[in-house]
């Protein structure tokens, strides 16, 4: 076995997104996710129990600061030149440091991608998205923040693994596997 194989291990990346029927994840970058169902919230919290670390954008971090304090959280931001650690929170600029290498060095095996859109996109582009859970809540928002955000069109393939109806009002939990 080569040296590189001995030094790296498989990291399993799972993204969680709660969206409206029209694919929005929030009204704007300052608004929370109080519109999601209790069933989705319970699923999300239970899933995080098995996770070593979460990756989150700076704006989402500001909204969920208190809850994220109890987790290993990597907060993506352009505002730092090198990783800055504050207790269990690490402020990380992926344009200045290699995120995959950083996660390897920490020996993380299960990493949750919890958004927002640029974070989901960054992970997708960098092959850091193995599974995708999308919860569709039965609302139409008409405007708002999209699930993924990029400045160039690209089509990525996913395979649907399961669909679960979470409640009577019709919240759907979709589980996808990255297929490229
Ligand atoms: N429904 C859901 O599942 C869900 C999930 C997550 C978030 N949300 C919602 O989404 C909204 C926040 O959205 P947002 O678009 O503002 O996204 P965000 O990802 O929370 O924050 C964007 C900021 O994160 C940093 N960032 C993200 N990707 C980066 C990268 N690749 N490199 C460097 N910095 C990066 C930048 O911060 P700097 O300005 O510091 O550089 C950027 O301005 C909130 O309302 C939140 O509630 C919903």
Image (cartoon, rainbow, N blue to C red):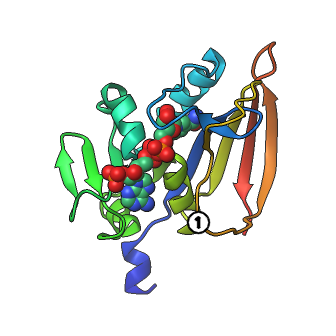
The image shows residue 124 at horizontal and vertical percentages of 59, 62
Count of marks overlaid on the render = 1
Q: Secondary structure at mark 1?
A: loop
The image shows residue 32 at horizontal and vertical percentages of 49, 26
| Nearer to the camera, 112 or 79 | 79
| Nearer to the camera, 108 or 101 | 101
Compared with residue 99, is residue 25 higher up or lower down, i.e. above or below? above
The image shows residue 153 at horizontal and vertical percentages of 69, 68
| Nearer to the camera, 173 or 19 | 19
Q: Examine the image and state in which quarter residue 43 appears.
A: top right
Label 1 CB-ligand 1 distance < 8 A: no
Mark 1 closeness class: few <14, some 14–19, many ≥20 residues within 10 Å = few
Residue drawn at the location 79% of the way across and 47% of the way down: 161
**Residue pointed to by mark 1:** 151
Q: Does residue 50 appear in the picture of this structure?
A: no
Q: Examine the image and state in which quarter residue 8 appears.
A: bottom left
**In this rendering, position of residue 91 left or right of residue 18:** left
Compared with residue 160, is residue 45 higher up or lower down, i.e. above or below? above
| Quarter of the figure that contains the C terminus | bottom right
């Amino acid at each position: 076995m080569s040296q590189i194989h001995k030094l790296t291990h498989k990291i399993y990346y799972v993204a969680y997104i709660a969206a409206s029927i029209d694919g929005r994840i929030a009204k704007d970058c300052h608004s929370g996710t109080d519109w999601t169902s209790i069933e989705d919230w319970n699923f999300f919290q239970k899933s995080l129990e098995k996770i070593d670390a979460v990756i989150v954008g700076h704006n989402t971090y500001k909204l969920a600061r208190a809850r994220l304090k109890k987790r290993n959280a990597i907060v993506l931001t352009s505002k730092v030149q090198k990783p800055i650690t504050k207790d269990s929170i690490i402020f990380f600029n992926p344009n200045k440091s290699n995120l995959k290498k950083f996660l390897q060095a920490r020996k993380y095996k299960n990493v949750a991608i919890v958004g927002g859109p640029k974070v989901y996109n960054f992970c997708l582009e960098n092959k850091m998205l193995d599974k995708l859970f999308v919860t569709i809540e039965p609302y139409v928002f008409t405007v708002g923040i999209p699930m993924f955000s990029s400045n160039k069109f690209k089509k990525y393939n996913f395979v649907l693994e399961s669909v679960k109806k979470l409640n009577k009002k019709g919240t759907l939990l979709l589980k996808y596997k990255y297929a490229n």
